[in-house]
Image (cartoon, grey):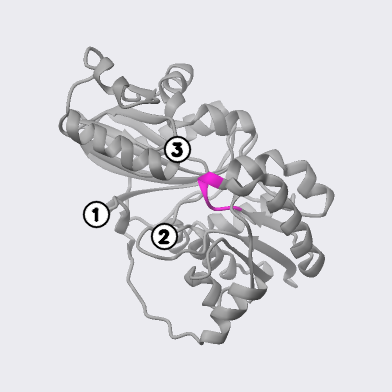
Amino acid sequence: MEKIKVTIAASGLNNIDSPGPGIPVIRGIRDSKDFDVRIVGLAYENLEPGAYMHELVDKTYKVPYPSEGSDALMERLKVINEQEHIDVLIPNFDSELYTFIKAENTLRDIGIQTFLPTMKQFEERHKSNLPEFGKKYQVKVPFSKPISSVSDIEKLKDDIEYPFVVKGKFYDAYIAQNKEQASMYFNRISAKWGLPIIIQEFIKGTEVNVVALGDGNGRTIGAVPMRKQYITDKGKAWGGITLDDSRMLDLTHHIISQTRWRGGMELELIRTDKNEFYLIEINPRLPAWVYLAVGAGQNLPEALVKLALGLPANPFTNYETGKLFIRYSYDMICNLDEFMKLSTKGEL
């Protein structure tokens, strides 16, 4: 069977200590037996390592941050598309999804397909909306409440006890043992990611995760559970192992079927000593450890491309348990002229 030629644009090329999912997603697509792929990288910074990984990324373009305005980002994408004729766009940052979900029809009009959650799905799984999400879909979630000022912390003393978790609306989470720490973390996260800040009940137990893909009609295309084996000081998995846990899979199938989830997702769960599962977060895209799923037998990035193109994507029925991923640092040697090209021309 002849491979289908396809041009994929992907963001999230910052393969650093807090890695974006872009490079693992690209690796999965590169492994495809069905696609002959050209990869166009979308970089927000000049030193995103993926831009210089030429064996994975064929061409890289600088793009403006979504915070600079959706119009500027869309205009840049139109220019890039005139050169590259992009078939599928895969955004890999939470902070850019709102813009791309809103622009789905505009992108389609210029020939670019996406496969993203609906705006309703994206909004209702927000950390600030998690209690309502839990009630609606009968999922256990910790108590949480969004706040907009440091003074709101004191007002929560009747609702929550220390320690509790202080979370940003997109990224970052810290465990606060007292009011002073809570105030410090509030200021640190709000300065970086803005308001609101979410205060969440601390659930004692083991953190486990599931990467999954929904077809938008309630069907789970694939799901792989994982336990972190090594965690960085930023809370990122630097090593993990696939798990044989039917209850985690049942919970994932339940959430996808009830929400009719469209696209990739990561469930962050806490398994308590009583073997109860609490949902602490839903990330509305494939996570940075998605290549573990590929290595375990479920190429979710490839399946995502098929869904975006309207091609058949058969659900995966199994995966290998006991598969490990171990992340590592690697020093690439690059030429200054490449850095200068990306910095001045916005292309590499």
- Tell me the element at label 2: loop
> Is residue 174 in sight in this rendering?
yes
Circle 1 crowding by C-alpha within 10 Å: few under 14, some 14–19, many from 20: few
- Tell me the element at label 3: loop
Q: Amino acid at mark 1?
A: Asp
Distance Cα–Cα, label 2 vs label 3: 21 Å
- The residue positioned 61% from the left and 40% from the top of the image is 98
Q: Main secondary structure of the magenta part?
A: loop
Checking the image for residue 233, the label placed there is 1
Measured from the top left, where is residue 262 in percent x and y?
Answer: 61, 39
Checking the image for residue 194, the label placed there is 3
Measured from the top left, where is residue 92 in percent x and y?
Answer: 54, 53
Label 2 close to label 3 by CB (< 8 Å): no
Q: Amino acid at mark 2?
A: Pro
Queried whether the magenta region covers residue 224, the answer comes back as no
Give the residue pinned by disc 2.
Answer: 19
Depth order, front residue of 15/216: 15
Magenta region: which residues?
91-95
Label 3 close to label 1 by CB (< 8 Å): no
Q: Amino acid at mark 3?
A: Gly
